Image (tube, rainbow, N blue to C red):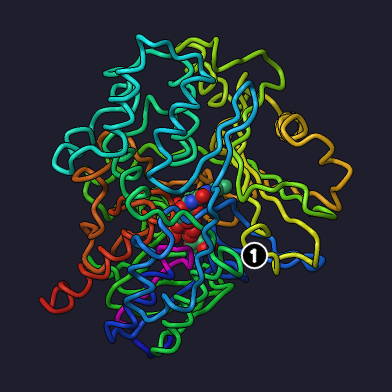
């Protein structure tokens, strides 16, 4: 056992852990940050290969320096050190009869919706409903949003539209936000995120790769005296006299801490790291019943030249079916996710594709391009009916149809499957969002950051917070930092 006693021990260096480590060190708390991987960043990590910077995930920052991530950076003095690059034309929905450019400016929303409605074959009679849907999604008054927390996005849309094409479109968008189907995702959370994104107008990508954000946060923590250890997997959260007292690593090292904050999933923290028996039954039952989002399969492509002009793309494909948004039905939209849940390649395969080198050309050798793309797959506890190769081929076929000729420019390709994500982020099953943003798990009903075990806190995308992915994790860290400060001041620490 080391003699040093830390005020705060943070488990994990994803956006949640890095944010909290930096905030905790800034508050003057003696902080230890532990990361099981050799590299920092969690889902936002990255590595170098043949002169290309490879993002481990497929990320855009939905609010750049303006939301919770920006707030953490601002508080720790790192905001000016991250350049969030914003393209004028953000993305394009393409494939299956759709071609709709997406911009970051609010002024273009009605133009975009007009184009989408036209391509989806929305009739004149349906237009007033579409107008109300757009208005509510983007401009709902703040005090009405909470009322939608415990209703699904599908219920919200059905208030205004039964157009199956619009349901399919929104289902794809919710898969991007929450990696979960629209008939399960919380409408309040979706509206909150959409409104904030619109207000911020800062969807962007950090120069230097997605890992830059966590790197700047951790640098700030270290500058303020925090200790960061990589290759330091926490095996156990040590519990003595009814309180969390520190952690034990895989290699046997032990560290004492007055507070332990885990940014792994709640299931992992409660059932594996701390041990379920020390928690009250209601907490155990709550954690056992938590819904998690889906996992993802990703393909990374190094290209010999700039093939894709857009900064990002939403590509729709139907490699084994004849899905067309214009002629589909709501039940077929549901079927897409039912298939996905069984690990079968669905009739509709949406690809979320980001081109980091179109934001920052220095991420590849001169003139070359790097592309990362993903689609949702079930968490690893589901036995996949279609093997990973079938998913990979479905994704590549979808891409080839949207970007003809791309294949002859591929220098190399890497597939990051569901198990690789699970193993890297350490959350069992590998969910993209460990506590899914569904009714009963958002807003006031989000799992609490302060656990019932004195000295143990949950943070990251599993507890507290609001927003899309990294924003959710950073917001959770902001809330956790405030709770820690209160608890330290009130002498509540064991
Ligand atoms: C393919 C994909 C695409 C995504 N796209 C976006 C996007 O475009 N925009 C967006 O905002 N979000 C996106 N997300 C979601 C986003 O990445 C996550 O919600 C967010 O990064 C979670 O941050 P976190 O800190 O909670 O957890 P993580 O980033 O998962 O970090 C957890 C960390 O804890 C470490 N850890 C776990 N257990 C232990 C242990 N026992 N000991 C030590 N360390 C441990 C892990 O190694 C990891 O570093 C995407 C996710 C995926 C998988």
- Residue 233 in the image: state x and y as whole percent: 53, 68
Whether residue 393 is in magenta: the answer is no
Near-viewer residue (359 or 6): 359
For the point 21% across and 49% down, the residue is: 280
Left or right for 314, reference 253? right
Left or right for 356, reference 281? right
User: Which corner quadrant holds the C terminus?
Assistant: bottom left
- Residue 428 in the image: state x and y as whole percent: 50, 47
Q: Name the element at disc 1.
A: loop
Residue segment shown in magenta? 7-17
Near-viewer residue (291 or 406): 406
**Which corner quadrant of the image does residue 4 belong to?**
bottom left
Classify mark 1: residues with Cα within 10 Å, few (<14), some (14-19) or many (20+): some
Q: Can residue 427 be seen here? A: no
* In the image, residue 246 above or below residue 161: below
Left or right for 135, reference 54? left
Task: Please identify the residue farthest to the left as the structure is shown.
Answer: 490
- Residue 447 in the image: state x and y as whole percent: 26, 48
User: Which corner quadrant holds the N terminus?
Assistant: bottom left
Task: Please identify the residue farthest to the right as the structure is shown.
Answer: 408
Left or right for 173, reference 262? right
Near-viewer residue (395 or 262): 395
**Which corner quadrant of the image does residue 155 belong to?**
top left
* In the image, residue 171 above or below residue 213: above
- Residue 60 in the image: state x and y as whole percent: 52, 53
For the point 60% across and 47% down, the residue is: 312
For the point 85% across and 55% down, the residue is: 304
- Mark 1 = which residue? 360
Q: Can residue 97 be seen here? A: yes
For the point 35% across and 40% down, the residue is: 437
Whether residue 12 is in magenta: the answer is yes
* In the image, residue 112 above or below residue 307: above
């Amino acid at each position: 056992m080391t003699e040093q006693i830390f005020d705060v021990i943070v488990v994990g260096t994803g956006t949640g852990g890095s944010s909290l480590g930096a905030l905790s060190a800034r508050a003057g708390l003696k902080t230890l940050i532990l990361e099981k991987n050799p590299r920092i960043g969690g889902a936002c990590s990255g590595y170098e290969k043949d002169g290309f910077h490879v993002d481990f995930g497929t990320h855009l920052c939905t609010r750049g320096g303006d939301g919770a991530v920006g707030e953490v950076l601002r508080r720790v003095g790192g905001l000016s050190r991250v350049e969030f690059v914003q393209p004028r034309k953000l993305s394009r929905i393409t494939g299956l009869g759709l071609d709709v450019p997406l911009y970051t400016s609010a002024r273009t929303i009605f133009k975009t919706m007009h184009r989408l409605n036209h391509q989806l074959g929305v009739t004149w009679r349906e237009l007033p409903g579409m107008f109300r849907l757009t208005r509510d999604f983007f401009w709902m008054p703040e005090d009405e949003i909470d009322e939608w927390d415990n209703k699904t996005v599908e219920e919200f849309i059905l208030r205004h539209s039964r157009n199956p094409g619009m349901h399919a479109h929104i289902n794809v968008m919710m898969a991007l936000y929450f990696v979960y189907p629209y008939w399960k995702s919380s409408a309040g959370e979706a509206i909150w995120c959409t409104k904030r994104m619109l207000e911020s107008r800062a969807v962007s990508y950090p120069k230097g790769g997605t890992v830059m954000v966590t790197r700047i946060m951790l640098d700030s923590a270290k500058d303020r005296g925090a200790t960061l250890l990589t290759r330091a997997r926490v095996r156990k959260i040590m519990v003595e006299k009814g309180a969390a007292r520190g952690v034990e690593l895989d290699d046997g090292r032990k560290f004492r801490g007055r507070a332990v904050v885990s940014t792994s999933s709640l299931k992992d923290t409660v059932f594996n790291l701390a041990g379920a028996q020390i928690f009250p039954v209601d907490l155990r039952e709550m954690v056992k019943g938590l819904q998690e989002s889906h996992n993802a399969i990703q393909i990374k492509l190094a290209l010999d030249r700039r093939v894709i002009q857009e900064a990002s793309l939403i590509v729709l494909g139907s490699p084994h079916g004849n899905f067309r948004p214009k002629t589909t039905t709501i039940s077929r939209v549901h079927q897409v996710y039912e298939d996905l849940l069984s690990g079968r390649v669905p009739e509709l395969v949406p690809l979320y594709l980001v081109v980091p080198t179109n934001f920052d050309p220095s991420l590849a050798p001169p003139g070359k391009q790097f592309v990362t793309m993903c689609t949702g797959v079930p968490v690893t506890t589901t036995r996949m009916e279609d093997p990973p190769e079938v998913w990979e081929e479905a994704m590549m076929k979808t891409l080839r149809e949207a970007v003809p000729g791309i294949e002859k420019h591929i220098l190399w390709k890497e597939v990051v499957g569901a198990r690789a994500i699970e193993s890297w982020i350490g959350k069992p099953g590998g969910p993209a969002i460990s506590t899914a943003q569904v009714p009963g798990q958002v807003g006031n009903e989000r799992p609490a950051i302060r656990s019932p075990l004195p000295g143990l806190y949950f943070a990251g995308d599993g507890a507290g917070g609001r927003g899309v992915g990294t924003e959710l994790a950073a917001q959770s860290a902001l809330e956790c930092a405030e709770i820690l400060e209160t608890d330290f001041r009130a002498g509540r620490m064991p």
